[in-house]
Amino acid sequence: MINRNKCFSNLSAGYLFPEVARRRVEYEKNHPDAKIISLSIGNTTEPLPAFIAEAMANYALALSTQEGYSGYGDEQGNSSLRKKIAETFYKNTASPDEVFISDGAKCDIARIQTLFGRDVKVAVQDPAYPVYVDGSVISGAAGANNGSGYDGIVYMPCTPENNFFPDLSQVSPNSLIYFCSPNNPTGAVSTKQELKTLVDFALGNGCIIVFDAAYREFIRDSSLPKSIFEIEGARKCAIEINSFSKPAGFTGVRLGWSVVPKDLTFADGTPVNKDWTRVMTTLFNGASNIAQAGGEAALEPEGLAAMKDVIDYYLDNANSIKNTLELKNFKNAGVKIYSTGNSPYIWAQFPGKKSWEIFDLFLDKCNVLVTPGSGFGPAGESFVRFSSFGHKKDVLEACRRLESLILQ
């Protein structure tokens, strides 16, 4: 028999979110009357804006006609959508042929590993979205978990003490740096000066930044950068990945994009854009034409306005959660709240307690699910992440339950 890819044996027991789901199922089995509300996973809950859904429906119906039928599209994405993304989000910083349409940011983050192989050095923010780490392990760029993280990965602690922006001096030259802003899970948004520090470090040390901007549309502070390409020099050291999932409710529709500048090269001078084109045309067959029709509608003025309304809805939920966590029962227990108003996530620290301990407490006493911070990396221990993705009535009910929680 063929041997198993040994890299899979290096992974920790379970991916974070399936483990949260498993524990929920186990709890409901033992407590069948529990009415659990999830403030955990970052899955959108509100209906697609009608304008966007209608565009996809019309496209799908047209497929039943000779004039409207379409088969394979370009693997890199339909040219009209690539042009619209460049004009809407990257005016003067990226061209349409540097935009690649995909089936979502998570898929791009996984595929991006193929560009660099198993010998690349990897650095991640700590805490960080688990796919950065698990994808590196599966690709062979990282080894087994040694108890404080995976061998071969440099963890850059992002804590309240450093304002959630890491010390880059520990990162080796010629490393692949995963960076997310607004950050998942901490919700922190890097300033222009902080991102300039990141870009300057990458340029000076031969590093490439994979910049995850999936939550950019939640930024309401106009002084904060939404794209790494707002920073001078970033085109020579960065790839940006983004998605329609959160702003347009496309978590199930699946549509995202990456931006790979032609100025970005490997050590031998080969353009990264050239190899990414090969990856996208060889290992991928293009995003759904129906989804891409929805993406184009989302970037029309009516679609952009509708997306803003949906994001405002989730930001209002986040504010309700933040206000609840600032009540006396939490303050008196020493709970520390970190919220920027520019992210769908609230990051909360419960000093002296383990993350899964807090998870169990909220589930048992309030029937409310949160996400344990330790699942995002070593620096996430004693924290939990609250997600604002939920129906308002459910979020408000969860807040009501939390108000009466007695913490010791």
Image (tube, rainbow, N blue to C red):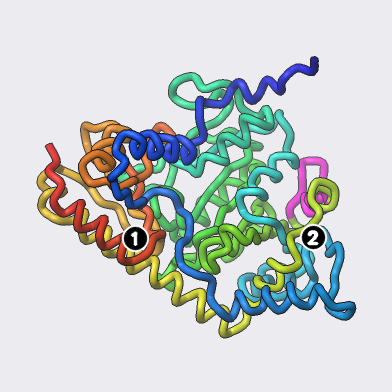
Quarter holding the C terminus is top left
Residue situated in front as seen by the camera: 262 or 371: 371
Q: Can residue 145 be spotted in the picture?
A: yes
Q: Are marks 2 and 1 in contact (CB under 8 Å)?
A: no
Measured as percent of width and height from the top left, residue 324 is found at: 20, 58
Residue shown at 85%/70% (left/top)?
70
Residue shown at 55%/58% (left/top)?
213
Residues in magenta, as a range: 264-277
Farthest right residue in view: 66
Residue shown at 81%/51% (left/top)?
271
Measured as percent of width and height from the top left, residue 80 is found at: 77, 75
Residue shown at 69%/75% (left/top)?
84
Left of 133 or right of it: where is 379? left
Q: Amino acid at mark 2?
A: Gln
Q: Which mark is residue 76?
A: 2
Q: Nearer the viewer, mark 2 or mark 1?
A: 2
Q: Is residue 26 above or below residue 290?
A: above
Residue at which label 1 appears = 340
Farthest front residue in view: 32
Q: On the image, which quarter does residue 94 sit in?
A: bottom right
Q: Is residue 264 above or below residue 352?
A: below
- Tell me the element at label 1: loop
